[in-house]
Image (cartoon, helix red, strand yellow):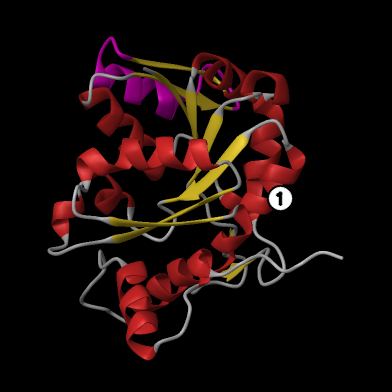
């Protein structure tokens, strides 16, 4: 399969490397076709790895990963091009984290909206699936780092796309439970990521713990519906 990874940071490189090791053809996209980080990643990962602009990667990939900085994701996706992404699954792992006031970061969009929803509105012909944004990138590609079962959020409006993303994730986490809802159901997930960042800043001893697992179990034990089980509000 051909996969486009948008973003050259730690998350993009970690996911891209894992996909190459799974024998997928991966193109890493950035603002420039001569990006030094992307070139170094290609050199380290061999013939199944390539690099180009955001538009090149979006056109190349049958499935796309948005691994850009959340506050810049919409601009990056505009550079990728709506036509290049049309009809494709975009797995959005980004969080709109604003570090302008230091740690812990705040969300640049929250409560009544989310980055996933913004992307879906901006690109209605793209099948946006929000997932993996509550966990450390090392855990994304190696769930065995934390013992036991894991809960992974999978949010999106297209059921077929969510099922496909679940198929992609399950070989690496066969015992995981995947909670699926509409794209707006992912609004609460970035808060979990911030909570984990804050905990790490206070010398938390579980830096790779999957916070979604903790939240899921707590909600079930208390008999309260979890965000991913919620129903969208009625529109009159």
- Image quadrant assignment for residue 221: bottom left
Q: Which residues are magenta?
A: 31-48
Q: Any magenta on residue 123?
A: no
Instruction: Tell whether position 45 is magenta.
Output: yes
Q: Residue at x 56, y 70 (%)?
A: 230
Is residue 103 visible in the rendered image? The answer is no
Going by the picture, which residue comes out furthest to the top?
Answer: 47
Residue 120 in view of the camera = yes
Residue furthest bottom as drawn? 222
Residue 42 at what x, y percent from top left? 34, 19
Residue located 51% across and 25% down the image: 29
Q: Residue at x 57, y 62 (%)?
A: 185
Residue 12 pos. (x, y %): 41, 37
Q: Residues within 10 Å of mark 1 (few under 14, many from 20)?
A: some
**How many numbered marks appear?**
1
Q: Which quadrant of the rendered structure holds the C terminus? A: bottom right
Q: Nearer the viewer, residue 181 or 141?
A: 181
At numbered mark 1, what does the secondary structure look like: helix, strand or loop? helix
150 lies left or right of 162: left
Q: Quadrant of the N terminus?
A: top left
Q: Is residue 50 left or right of residue 138?
A: right
- Residue at the spot 42% in from the left edge and 25% down from the top edge: 38
Q: Is 171 above or below relative to 39?
A: below
Q: Is residue 112 above or below residue 55?
A: below
Coordinates of residue 149 in the picture (x, y in percent)? 19, 62
Frontmost residue, 119 versus 35: 119
* Residue annotated with mark 1: 118
From the viewer's perspective, is residue 22 above or below residue 219?
above
Residue 234: where, in percent of width, then height? 76, 67
| Residue 54 falls left or right of residue 124 | left
């Amino acid at each position: 399969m051909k996969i486009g990874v948008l973003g050259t940071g730690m998350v993009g490189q970690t996911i891209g490397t894992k996909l190459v090791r799974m024998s997928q053809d991966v193109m890493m996209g950035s603002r420039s076709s001569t990006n030094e980080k992307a070139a170094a990643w290609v050199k380290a990962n061999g013939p199944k790895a390539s690099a180009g602009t955001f538009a090149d990667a979006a056109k190349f990939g049958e499935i796309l990963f948005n691994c850009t900085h959340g506050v810049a994701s919409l601009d990056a996706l505009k550079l990728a091009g709506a036509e290049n992404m049309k009809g494709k699954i975009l797995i959005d792992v980004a969080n709109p984290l604003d570090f302008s006031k230091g740690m812990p970061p705040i969300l640049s969009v929250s409560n009544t909206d989310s980055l996933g929803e913004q992307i879906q509105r901006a690109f209605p012909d793209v099948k946006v699936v929000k997932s993996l944004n509550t966990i450390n990138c090392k855990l994304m590609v190696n769930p065995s780092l934390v013992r036991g079962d894991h809960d992974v959020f999978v949010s999106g409006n297209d059921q077929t796309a969510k099922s496909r993303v679940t198929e992609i994730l399950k070989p690496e986490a066969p015992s995981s439970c995947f909670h699926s809802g509409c794209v707006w159901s992912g609004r609460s997930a970035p808060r979990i990521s911030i909570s984990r960042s804050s905990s790490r800043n206070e010398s938390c001893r579980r830096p790779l713990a999957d916070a979604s697992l903790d939240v899921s179990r707590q909600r079930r034990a208390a008999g309260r519906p979890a965000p991913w089980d919620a129903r969208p509000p009625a529109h009159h």
